[in-house]
Amino acid sequence: MLVSHVLGGIGNQMFQFAAGRALSLNNDQKYLLDLSNFSDYRLHHGFELSRVFNVVTEPAEASTLHQLLGWRENKLARKVLRRRQFSGLRGKTFVVEPYFNYWSDFFNLTGDCYLYGYWQSERYFKAVESVIRQDFTFREPLKEHNAELALEMASIQSVSLHVRRGDYVSNPKNHNIMSVCDLEYYRLAINYIATHVEHPVFYLFSDDMAWVKQNLPMEFPCVYIEHNGGAESYRDMQLMSLCRHHIIANSSFSWWGAWLNPNPQKIVVAPKHWFCNGNDDSDLIPDEWVRL
């Protein structure tokens, strides 16, 4: 039995699920998700995977977690045990991501275990990419204006461009972890696309579109996507995935928007600096993507 701790926005949920799914397939194990922390989680839109995607998820019951973890099932205990100095108390089943970049011992986990971490690298699930792409097909087709945009994107050299600000700017904790992509990055990324793609049309996505319109000058045809809000916010990711090329922010949301585009000829530009706290992000960006 394999259980993944899942928490965060939809992009983080996708990474956590994909890594655990790959390990469960590798070991032929039953795969469950611990969703218990969503009961008092007020950020983003709660657990979204089963609502958004054609993915089969099965939540782990409290009794199952107790069977797997014993006294470590306690939320406070798990919060303490994830700290490195308490690693000796984790036992064999409570597995904490040891560092941010790819952990080469991940697939040496063969017994029952509980995965706690972000697991943000394609290397965890590259071997079962076709399965993950099938899991992450969108459940509901686009409608009305989104459907019109999808047709338009398919007929031109469409480029998604994502600007992430929101809690990166307003939340002091996040501000000390996540870099905020500056205007120089977007200028370089736009120029890179323009030199490699004929007649690009940029589709801009952001959680602060007013800032984008005021601060990010566009010399190329562009469309501002600002109608997908609330529980429909994931539609932005769906639209991103339909663009031919991508300029992503240091955000798992636009990372997945670009990754879900299956076109092997796509150009994806990603920021060179993802974090400002020293995390090693060398395994976060696929080798074929461009970092600026």
Image: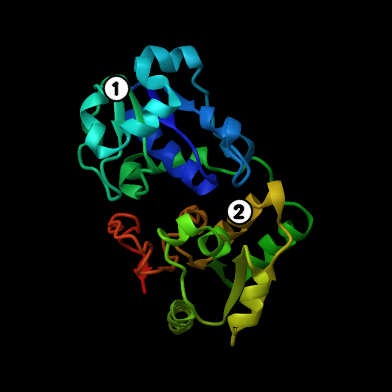
- Name the image quarter holding residue 275: bottom left
Neighbours of disc 2 within 10 Å: few (<14), some (14-19), many (20+): many
**The N terminus - image quarter:** top left
Q: Earlier in the sequence, mark 2 or mark 1?
A: 1
Residue that extends furthest to the right in the rendered view of this protein: 144
Where does residue 227 sit, x and y in percent of width and height?
74, 61
* Cβ atoms at labels 2 and 1 below 8 Å apart: no
Marks 2 and 1: which is nearer the front? Answer: 1
Instruction: State how many labels appear.
Output: 2
Image height check: is 141 above or below 201?
above
Drawn side of residue 274 relative to residue 140, left or right: left
Model colouring: rainbow
Q: Nearer the viewer, residue 250 or 173?
A: 173
Q: Quadrant of residue 210?
A: bottom right
Residue 156 in the image: x percent, y percent? 61, 72
Residue under circle 1?
Answer: 93
Distance from label 2 to label 1 (Cα)? 36 Å
Amino acid bearing label 1: Thr
Give SS at disc 2: helix
- Kindly tell me whether residue 276 is visible in this rendering: yes
Task: Using the rendered image of the protein, determine whether residue 258 is visible from the camera's viewpoint.
Answer: no
Which image quarter: residue 203?
bottom right
Q: Is residue 140 rendered to the left or right of residue 76? A: right
Which residue shows up at 55% across the image and 58% down it? 167
The residue lying at 43 percent from left, 81 percent from top is: 188
Q: Secondary structure at mark 1?
A: loop
Identified by mark 2, the residue type is Gln
Image position, residue 217 (x, y; %) = 59, 85
Q: Which residue is mark 2?
A: 238
